[in-house]
């Protein structure tokens, strides 16, 4: 299953859903999955700060 996300790291079909990390078959490794998690966390903070 692949969940798309926009430039705010949210799913365009389910606002407030922040798919993060990497799934099976797409994983580059534990470090890149962790970095993606940090990127998503920053995106959540940015969106929440605007509201």
Image (tube, helix red, strand yellow):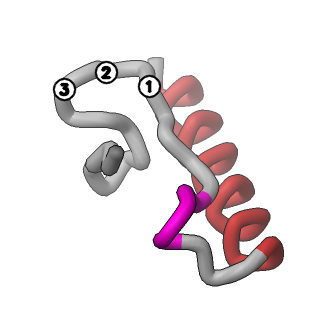
Q: Which residue is mark 2?
A: 15
Q: Which residue is mark 1?
A: 17
**Residue 25 horizontal/vertical position (percent):** 49, 70
Residue furthest to the front: 25
Question: How far is disc 2 from disc 3 in space, using C-alphas?
Answer: 6 Å
Please, what secondary structure does the residue beneath circle 1 have?
A: loop
Classify 20 as above or below 34: above
For image coordinates 72% across by 69% down, the residue present is: 35
Nearer to the camera, 48 or 12? 12
Label 1 environment density (alpha carbons within 10 Å; few <14, some 14–19, many ≥20): some
Q: Is residue 24 left or right of residue 12?
A: right
Classify 39 as above or below 4: below
Q: Tell me if residue 11 is in the magenta stretch.
A: no
Magenta segment boundaries in residue numbering: 22-26
Q: Is residue 14 left or right of residue 19?
A: left
Q: Are marks 2 and 1 in contact (CB under 8 Å)?
A: yes
Residue furthest to the left: 13
User: Which mark identifies residue 32?
Assistant: none
Count of numbered badges drawn on the protein: 3
Please, what secondary structure does the residue beneath circle 3 have?
A: loop
In the picture, the quarter occupied by the N terminus is: top left
For image coordinates 48% across by 71% down, the residue present is: 26
Classify 37 as above or below 45: below
* Eye-nearest disc, 2 or 3: 3
**Residue 21 horizontal/vertical position (percent):** 62, 55
Q: Which residue is mark 3?
A: 13
Based on the displayed image, in which of its 4 quarters is residue 31 positioned? bottom right
Based on the displayed image, in which of its 4 quarters is residue 39 positioned? bottom right
């Amino acid at each position: 299953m692949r969940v798309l996300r926009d430039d705010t790291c949210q799913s365009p079909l389910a606002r407030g859903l922040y798919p993060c990390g990497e799934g099976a078959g797409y994983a580059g490794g534990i470090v890149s999955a962790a970095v993606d998690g940090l990127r998503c966390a920053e995106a959540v903070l940015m969106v929440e700060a605007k509201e």
